[in-house]
Image (cartoon, helix red, strand yellow):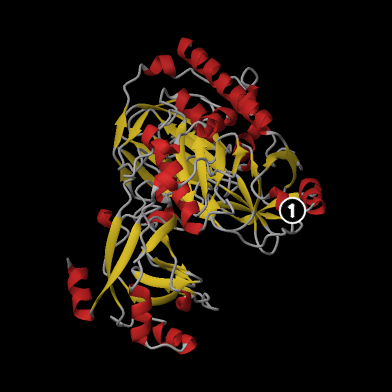
Amino acid sequence: MISIKHLTLFAHFVDGCRHFSQMSAFSSAGPLDAISHRMVNALVGNSKNEACIECFGGGLTIVFDHDCLIALGGWETPAFINEKPIKYYQTISVQKGQELCLQNSDSVTAPIYVAISGSVQLPKKFNSVDCVIREEGKNLASSVLAEGQDFAFNYHNFPQKQFATRSIDQTEFSILFEHLAYSARQFKQVGDVDVHLTYQASSFDAKQLLRFLSSPYQVSKQSDRMGIRLNGPAILCNKQSLTSQGIAYGSIQITGEGQAIILRNDRQTIGGYPVIGCVSWISMQRLAYFNPDTPFRFNAVSIECARQKRLLIESAFERLHKTLDSA
Amino acid sequence: MHSHIPNYSVIPLNKVTKLQALNEQSVMLYFDYNELNKLQRNEWVVSYYHALLSNKPIWLNDMVPSYETLLIEFDSLLVDHYAVINYIRGINTDLITQELNQKKLNMPICFEQASDEHPLDSRQICQDLDISIEQLKHLFLNSSYRAYAVGFMPNFAYLGYVHEQLKLNRLKQPRAKVPAGAVAIADDQCAIYPKATPGGWQIIAYTPIDLASDEKFEMSVGDEISFYEIDKRQFFEYAKQ
């Protein structure tokens, strides 16, 4: 069992995204940063799609009733095991009865991941424990953490001494950390967000497309797992509405007022607003760490280029697994 | 009653007007062929949807059928969008069987106001359209409806199309809460709200069926839904079951 002793803002269990759920109008869900989610799972010997805790705002205290391994990833917020500070992206050995404490974070939108060696026992839908509050309601969403709550947990039995020294070399596997490297904590401008112009892009005239691709945008505070609302120049479309269409991950919808919204994991499955393009998969993981008011620009890329970057990440994970397994 | 079950032997092949790559892991099929009406376009969406679902290629992750488009999500680590587009081009829709698991559902609805928690817009609608409540019921019940899309929330089906005389604008001021079970009209479509949610569709009736949990009434694109009238007493009896 794991016990939630304290929670300031919001946390939930999230595994790899749901498949064949959108056919039934259920969101695909899944982690906002699939790269960090997978890294922390690898560090504790879990399969890549195993459920981790995704926490926003920090302020989380968990008590473990069994020896286990944990690993932290995502937005680095001071973390302690029984008041002893611990590092991110390395395997940490935890003894029965010890507490993991995440301090309150300086970001309420960037995710922090906590992987625990084993699997949480939660009901599944579409072969996933993920719940979307918009679909279930907060009280019925079984994967959402609440203070005072216990979760049944099936701990793996690992030779702790062998695993406890594992970590991910941020130089050797720099490609897996690139999406975190340009977070607003370190840089005043976080660089470009790759976008493929598609859907109704041809319904925007050249002046609008140029404005879209050359103007600075900022993530607004009205952003959540469903979508990122952007502050920036209004982009006008020749089509004000259209017959509702399926909404791909990363779609950039343009509302009637010209506001851009990037649709994310908990998005509705169909929509009637024009879409100007889709953010690439890697840029979607980066966006998880953009703080409000930090400027960025869209960079038009081809799908082939975007896919190549995706494949490079996958290749890095194959190397990582070999490295961790031989450690 | 309209028949919405297509006769595939007379529909020409390959009515995909556009195959569009959206990102590394999604493509969109468009069926906005000028010579096809809305129903025929949606029939093609459903036929491709079922063709993919019945063979389920290993790279297929999800699909979203909606009106005249079909979104396909795939595993970009296994294939690229060229491979998916080639696969789709090779689908022989002649081989799709007539049985596409499309359901025909018959749903009870009550036009009377069951309680204060079940607001209705019928009186205002009849006034605006200059028809009686009996005429409203007749116009609504006399058709069956096809689910052209399911979205907004799980099991919220966009049903089309209502009788020409029943076309309605959305409410100028949407309700903060439309109760679960509300049968409502906006523009030329109707829908049943599975859960309470804010909304601007005009409510004409309620169903006692819990669409959020009753699997027998889970709607998919292509399903045919018809309605029959029950009174207030039957509404409450049904709701108790």
Q: Is residue B18 above or below residue B198?
A: above
Q: Residue at x 34, y 32 (%)?
A: A119
Q: Which residue is mark 1?
A: A204
A72 over A7 or under it: above or below: above
On the image, the x and y values in percent for residue B237 come to: 17, 73
Q: Is residue B172 left or right of residue B142?
A: right
Residue A293 appears in view: no
x then y, percent, for residue B46: 43, 47
For the image, the number of numbered tags is: 1
| In this rendering, position of residue A87 left or right of residue A235 | left
On screen, residue B203 above or below B52: below
Q: Nearer the viewer, residue B32 or A246?
A: B32
Q: Nearer the viewer, residue A321 or B217?
A: B217
The quadrant of the rendering that contains the C terminus of chain B is bottom left
Residue at 62 percent across and 61 percent down: it is A241
Which is nearer the eye, B2 or B217? B2
Q: Say what amino acid the circle numbered 1 marks.
A: Phe
Q: Where is residue A92 shown, x and y percent of the image?
A: 46, 25
Task: Tell me where residue B137 appears, x and y as whole percent.
Answer: 34, 79
Image quadrant holding the N terminus of chain B, namely bottom left
Q: Is residue B232 left or right of residue A219?
A: left
